[in-house]
Structure formats: structure tokens, C-alpha cells
Image (spheres, rainbow, N blue to C red):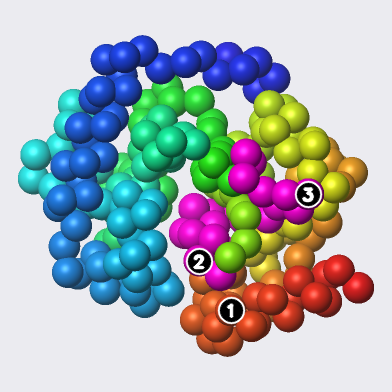
Amino acid sequence: MSEHEPLQPLSPSQREMLEEATSAYQEALTPGVARYLLDRGIGREEAVTHRLGVVGDRPFPGHERFRGMLAIPYLDRNGAPLTVRFRCLEEHDHRAAFHGKYNTIKDDPPRMYGIADVHQAGDTIEVTEGELDRIILRKIGLHAVAIPGASLWQGRHRRMLAGFNRVRVWGDPDDAGAEFTARICRSLRSAKGVRLRDGDVSETYMQGGAQALLDLIKENDQ
């Protein structure tokens, strides 16, 4: 599929399977994973709202290699899942374990996380480099979406954001984050990078709370 082509709608059976999987993974959320999320500023309310979960002992077909991972569903504007990505929570060599730190279902096209905010935002929207960072910006009252890395930015994503007067890009303060910010800013004239200094969005929030992020916005808008 070309990056410029619109995504094909999911079939009823695909939607049903994704809904069943997302609900099952929500129910399997463990205290340990809840603590992991809380350490990143994501409490129970946010976990429930965004339907975060864990792949338990009975993963759905095609999800077997994601057992034990954090399940991050990509929801449509009505809260129904369009796909699920998985975050390994083990502190090990992910490549040696034959998976990535973040993992996508095989053959799944690159998607934008948090698309409901494209419909709800006014003239400004935030773009983060990771799903959990997007949840933090949403928590503090900002409309935001996420793209999980520069390589997954697509032409259709540009079209989805082209109507906004201001697009703030929250790339991580590293080389990959710089590439992420540069790629989106080259694609959208309305886009401008926010200069993170003390880690990513979640780390900045944990160090200085919502005000630390809002101060960066004030600095960016000057």
C-alpha cells in the first residue's frame, strides 16, 4: 500500500476480533503493569480511557509472540480499536529476544494514534513521537496525536493534519527525535518543533508536572 493511499476499512470480523482482544487485554492488566504506567504519569483513569492492557496467558491469534507485553490499542473516534501495538516491558536485549521494544501486528499499515483528536481539536494540535507521550498531553488538556517514529510518517498523515493552523511536534531530545521533528516540519508548513530538554514528554511531565510542558509551549509560541 502506498503511503498516500487511504486505509482500507476493517471488515466486521476484523473489528469484532480487535474488540474482543482489546477487552480481554484490558481485563488482564496487572498491578505490576499499572505501576509501570503510573511511573510514567499514566493513572487508572487514563489507562481505562485509552483501553490499555496486557497480553495475558491466552493471546489472540497472531499475538502469541506479544505475551506479557503492554497492549496499546489504536482507537477510532468512537473508542473502537483499529489495531493494537505492543510494548515489551522487559529490560533486556529486545533484538536477541526476536522482537522490538515496540511491536506491530504483521502487515498492519502505519496508523496515527489518537485520531479522535483530529476531529475534536480546534486550530492547534500536538504530535508526539510515542503513544504514551500522547496520553500525557491529553491528560493535561491538549489535543494530540502520535506517530511512532519518523519512518512511519505517511502522506495520508500530512493530509489529516493539513487543516490545522498550528501543529506542535514533540520529538524526543535525541537524533531519532530530531529526524522525527524535521520530517514532519518539512511536510507541513504549519508544523514547528517543541524543544524538549529534560527527556521525552513523559519524563518532562514526571519531573515538572503539567506546568513544565505548558512552559515549553509558551516558549515555542513566542
**Badge 2 vs badge 1, beta-carbon distance below 8 Å:** yes
Residue depicted at 89% across the width and 44% down the height: 189
Residue 110 visible: yes
Q: Earlier in the sequence, mark 1 or mark 3?
A: 3
Q: Position of residue 73 (x, y in %)?
A: 37, 42
Q: Amino acid at mark 2?
A: Lys
Q: Quadrant of residue 75?
A: top left
The Cα–Cα distance between marks 1 and 3, rounded to whole angstroms, is 21 Å
Check whether the beta carbons of the residues at disc 1 and disc 3 lie within 8 A of each other.
Answer: no
Residue 197's label in the rendered image is: none
Q: Is residue 126 magenta?
A: yes
State the CA–CA distance, disc 2 to disc 1. Answer: 9 Å
Q: Residue at label 2?
A: 139
Q: Quadrant of residue 66?
A: top left
Quadrant where the C terminus sits is: bottom right
Looking at numbered disc 1 in the image, what kind of residue is underneath it?
Ala
Q: Is residue 105 left or right of residue 206?
A: left
Ranked by sequence position, the earlier of labels 2 and 1 is 2
Residue situated furthest bottom in the rendering: 208
On-image quarter of the N terminus: top right
**From this viewpoint, is residue 182 visible?**
no
Q: Amino acid at mark 3?
A: Asp
Q: Nearer the viewer, mark 1 or mark 3?
A: 3
Q: Residue furthest left?
A: 57
Q: Give how far apart the Cα atoms at labels 3 and 2 are.
A: 19 Å
Residue linked to disc 1: 210
Residue 154 vertical position relative to residue 146 in the rendered view, above or below: above
What are the residue bounds of the magenta stretch?
A: 118-140
Of the residues under marks 3 and 2, which one precedes in the sequence? 3
Residue at which label 3 appears: 123
Q: Residues within 10 Å of mark 2 (few under 14, many from 20)?
A: some
Q: Is residue 138 magenta?
A: yes
